Image (cartoon, grey):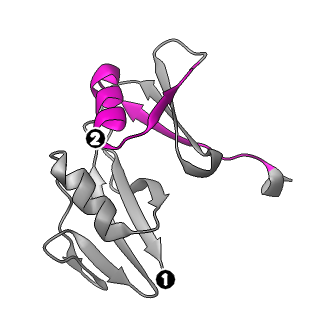
Amino acid sequence: MLAKGFAMATVPAEDLERAIKFYTEKLGLKKGESREEGSALFEAGGGSKIFMYQRNRTKAEHTAITFDVPDLEATVKEITAKGVKFEQYHFGPIDTNEMGIAATGNSKAAWLTDTEGNILALVQSS
């Protein structure tokens, strides 16, 4: 049933205006039109979308959004140049380098935390 349905990530924002600024200026996403008050919609690659709604801060301990990128190192450099810090993980099979990039099997990944505490991953498949 859902195999042909469009999927969209949904994340909370404690400060919606701060989050909009981060997602547009730091991550380069285009802000779309949201029909709901107290929310924002962002357009990402391949027609995917991210819906964000205003609420008190939550504690995410997992990746909320994953972006598949063609060149992870270039993307990390570009976002880092805008003042975004990538996470450093050193546990189990995940061991990030100085840029925050980890080799994970046949792919590479890097993680960052947005202004609202949501964990985002960037992944490049080999």
Residue found at x 82% / y 53%: 4
**Is the residue 90 above or below the residue 38 in the image?**
below
Query: Which type of secondary structure does the marked residue at label 1 adopt?
Result: loop
The residue range painted magenta reads: 5-34
- Is residue 24 shown in magenta? yes
Residue 23 location in percent, x, y?
36, 37
Q: Nearer the viewer, residue 85 or 82?
A: 82
Residue type beneath disc 1? Ser
- Residue that mark 1 sits on: 126
What x and y, as percent, mark residue 27?
Answer: 34, 44
Circle 2 sits on which residue? 26
124 versus 38 height, above or below = below
Circles 2 and 1 in contact, beta carbons < 8 Å: no
Percent position of residue 59, x then y: 30, 44
On the rendered structure, is 93 left or right of 95?
right
Residue at (16, 54) in percent of width and height: 85
Q: Earlier in the sequence, mark 2 or mark 1?
A: 2
**Amino acid, disc 2:** Lys
Q: Quadrant of residue 57?
A: top left
Q: Residue at x 27, y 25 (%)?
A: 18
> How dense is the environment of label 1, judged by Cα within 10 Å: few (below 14), some, or many (20 and up)?
few
x%, y% of residue 35? 61, 16
Asked if residue 81 lies left or right of residue 67, the reply is: left
